[in-house]
Amino acid sequence: MSSDHKLHLIAFSEKGVQLMHALAGASSFQTHCYDGAAVKAGGGVGTVAGSVFQAHVENPQALVFICAAGIAVRAIAPYVADKLSDPPVIVIDDCGRFVISLLSGHLGRANALTKQIAKVLQKTGYEAVPVVTTATDSRGLEGFEAVFTHYKVPITAARGDLKTLNMAIANGETIGLYIDPWLKSKHVKQIDHFGDAIKTYDDFDAFNAHQGKRVLIALRKPEAFRGTTPDFVYYSKCIVVGTGCKRGVTSSDYEKALEAALDTYAISKKALCTFASIALKSDEPCIRLTAETLDCQCHFWDAEAIAAVESQFEGSDFVKRTVGVSAVAGPSAYLLTHDTLSKNTIRGGQCTFAFGRLSI
């Protein structure tokens, strides 16, 4: 049993400390144990909790209190800020009867960790009943976050609707879901866990006729689809922009050329995740600034990497003389995605673009 989170275990009583070490010893979790003396040395339980909240910003952390729930609530109260950023917090009574998901159940994965920890403790002889109180999980269902996470939809873009969607699931409604066929994706096993709460559609007309909330997860803008715009439209950030440009292109001109290239396929800017090019272009402000504006990463390949695949792309003698390889945009996208779409280069005056889709 493992987790990406580092578990910070806090216990005070003799029984609690015994349970803490049993949990740390029986699992493959990465753990840090605090008994009463260690908590005092760390400045008190509130200070220890605050340091974990702060560390969680960089790497996944989890707080596990083996004590009364009230102690945990008071310790974390000054630091609770946002469900998108708060670490998972779990409480276990020192007799090991209950493992309670207290904070950040869905997004922080406290619910999943609670169940994992309970299984570990059960194997060491504790009763360890997992207690999860979020409405969807109480009904044996996951939150809609599981769908967003799989399809690389930023939770920040969907946070305003999560409560509405999860409440619909909790109330027994059926949400219609349509995944843009342009996504290179496989079936999401998690959707099976939703039972009748989510109905996936392969036909957009049938989806358009769904009676209830309709969710579209797409790469392309809604106008690329027939019928009315669904209630909820989200974009999967899995489009890589392979790009090249002449030296000194302004950000304004570059963005206009990008818009025109995206319009060729009706791709939304919200679906972009990475700008890729040759290392010689790594100092071009227009690429870096546009990527930053669109909350995208940059990846720059050395000429040798591009040369290994350039024969698969239509090239240019001028580009070859200038940068050492005959094509930049297409190979740069292809190396990250292995998507044949990237073999279609779009030339826009001073800029070239090719798009590739990450498989999810």
Image: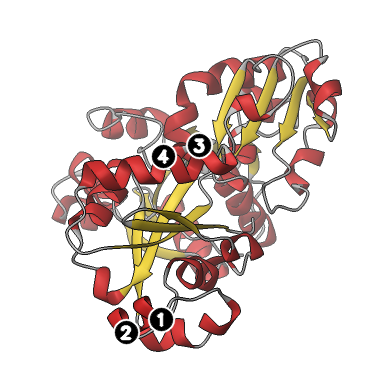
Please report whichever mark, 4 or 2, sits nearer to the chain's N-terminal start: 4
Q: Amino acid at mark 3?
A: Ser
Crowding at mark 2 (Cα within 10 Å: few <14, some 14-19, many 20+): few
Which dot, 1 or 4, sits closer to the camera? 1
Q: Which mark is residue 259?
A: 4
Cα separation, mark 4 vs mark 3, equals 9 Å
- Name the residue tied to disc 3: 268
**In which quadrant of the rendered view does residue 157 lie?**
top left
Q: Nearer the viewer, residue 106 or 138?
A: 106
Q: Mark 3 and mark 4 in contact (Cβ < 8 Å)?
A: no
Crowding at mark 4 (Cα within 10 Å: few <14, some 14-19, many 20+): some
Which element type, helix, strand or loop, lies under badge 3? loop
Q: x, y (%) of residue 98?
A: 59, 39
Q: Residue at x 34, y 44 (%)?
A: 295
Q: Amino acid at mark 2?
A: Arg
Q: Mark 2 and mark 4 in contact (Cβ < 8 Å)?
A: no
Q: Residue at x 68, y 15 (%)?
A: 168
Q: Mark 2 and mark 1 in contact (Cβ < 8 Å)?
A: yes
- Name the residue tied to disc 2: 321
Which dot, 3 or 2, sits closer to the camera? 2
- Name the residue tied to disc 1: 317
Cα separation, mark 4 vs mark 2, equals 28 Å
Cα separation, mark 3 vs mark 2, equals 34 Å
Which element type, helix, strand or loop, lies under badge 4? helix
Please report whichever mark, 1 or 3, sits nearer to the chain's N-terminal start: 3
Q: Amino acid at mark 4?
A: Glu
Which dot, 1 or 3, sits closer to the camera? 1
Which dot, 4 or 2, sits closer to the camera? 2
Cα separation, mark 1 vs mark 3, equals 32 Å
